[in-house]
Amino acid sequence: MNWCAEAAAVAATVPGAGVGDGGLRPPMVPRQASFFPPPVPNPFVQQTRIGIFLLGIILLPLRALLVGLMLLLAWPFAAVSTACCPEKLTHPVNDWRRKITQPALTFLGRAMFFSMGFLVTVKGKIASPLEAPIFVVAPHSTFFDGIACVVAGLPSLLSRNENAQVPLIGRLLRAVQPVLVSRVDPDSRKNTINEIIKRATSGGEWPQILVFPEGTCTNRSCLITFKPGAFIPGVPVQPILLRYPNKLDTVTWTWQGYTFIQLCVLTFCQPFTKVEVEFMPVQVPSDEEIKDPILFASRVRNLMAEALGIPVTDHTYEDCRLMISAGQLTLPMEAGLVEFTKISRKLKLDWDGIRKHLDEYASIASSSKGGRIGIEEFAEYLKLPISDVLRQLFALFDRNNDGSIDFREYVIGLAVLCNPANTEEIIQVAFKLFDVDKDGCITEEEFSTILQASLGVPDLDVSGLFKEIAQGDSISYEEFKNFALRHPEYAKIFTTYLDLQTCHVFSMPKEVQTTPSIASNKVSPENHEENTSDKKDD
């Protein structure tokens, strides 16, 4: 975005340009259309309110007893399957033990889900290990999704090391030869990917691998970003769709909703719970997708979303972390959702950077209702009065024109509108603009004069803002630079005056254009009477 384009966006804010009309909006800035809000605001909440049926008083203890019985019956088979085997396998278990125990464990798994009240409908054909070494299952919305593993014939799963240590459950988990992930090992991610590649390219020696590529539970209203781990090996994958077509939703387990125990109780109390498991056609990656796993993951996700009839969004597990952080900062948890995948890729921001912005946002929005920033909070944070230029800057952040800024709009606004203008070169030019007498420091009078001209507020009091920047009676370049880098919101305000003058010069006929100099940006340059008149006309 060049300076004239930026200046055009704020040109209407100077006196005489007609910005006082509240109905006017700034023109769409480049790339803005790519940041439209997601079709599903928050896929990580479930707010269903359900009571317990009278029948549940009988079903609950009966089903809990049956589930416990099935687990106890399955344990001996799991113990035989894993006998004399290390916790982390280096070779597949394909001898007589697997041939005997796998059918028994599969049958008991189906019986356990039936005893919970699940009525399972299976569609499609299960691919062989040679046809599709990897299953990808979505949407992932509950711990009951383990039914896909049972229906698929107990393929290997990805699981944490700690889960393999849990009594009874850990032995059952080890029976499916899982890929174990360590949280303390810094090389865990690399080792996990290498293990998936080794198994997926073994030519059928290892069991198939079942992966939930979303990496966290959602409310099934959309498909969030697929993590690329299952697609890095570049082998064919078979998508598996999960549907729960029930009038009452007692299975969804999200970050904000029912707990594990509550969902078990509610589900066990239902007469029955329907679930559909659909095996889609195997998806073979193209040469381009083998080189780019993210491209392969995106295509598979789009196919699955189309079959489910739901949209896709760029939310991911990091959005959950931001949502929790927002709650800890006394903001609504939904305030932390930014579609992390899109924001991080397009704006080159990492999780730590966005988390830092969340702290800044919370300091502004903590006193507002609903955790959103209005023009009053925005002006108070910037220590500036509500003026035409401030309204225009606020409108550039307020991307949906609803009169308030949410955290997502705040992050995009900082990155798209402020940071590109907050370079070292621009900061140097802005400092020279304020330093009217060129003595290497900015006095409060110089600072006030330029901001009054930039904001169009003749009686502007900037003493509070000046004291926040200056450590003494004047502002040095280092103080100005440090403040501008810490507070990128001021970048456009600091350079508005310069932008308007630059745009004015380059819009003049070629025969009268001159290269804009620092002197021409002074409030009182030489031939000040003529120049002052010109500036009033701009």
Image: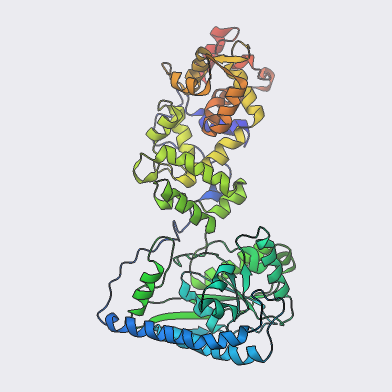
Is 189 left, or right, of 32 in this rendering?
right
Is 138 left, or right, of 2 in this rendering?
left
Residue drawn at point x = 45 percent, y = 53 percent: 324
Q: From what the image shows, is residue 159 above or below residue 382?
A: below
Residue 451 image position (x, y, % from top left): 50, 20
For residue 316, say whether it is visible: no
What kind of colouring is applied to the model shown?
rainbow
Residue drawn at point x = 60 percent, y = 87 percent: 80
Q: From what the image shows, is residue 124 above or below residue 215?
A: below
**Total count of labels:** 0
Placement of the N terminus among the 4 image quadrants: top right
Residue drawn at point x = 40 percent, y = 86 percent: 66
Residue 458 image position (x, y, % from top left): 43, 16
Q: Nearer the viewer, residue 114 or 411?
A: 114
Of all residues, the one furthest to the left in this rendering is 54
Residue 419 image position (x, y, % from top left): 59, 36
For residue 534, say whether it is visible: yes
Q: From what the image shows, is residue 150 above or below residue 499?
A: below
User: In which image quadrant can residue 3 be found?
Assistant: top right
Q: Nearer the viewer, residue 9 or 45?
A: 45
User: In which image quadrant can residue 215 be found?
Assistant: bottom right
Residue 418 image position (x, y, % from top left): 56, 35
Residue drawn at point x = 46 percent, y = 88 percent: 111
Q: Nearer the viewer, residue 310 or 43?
A: 43
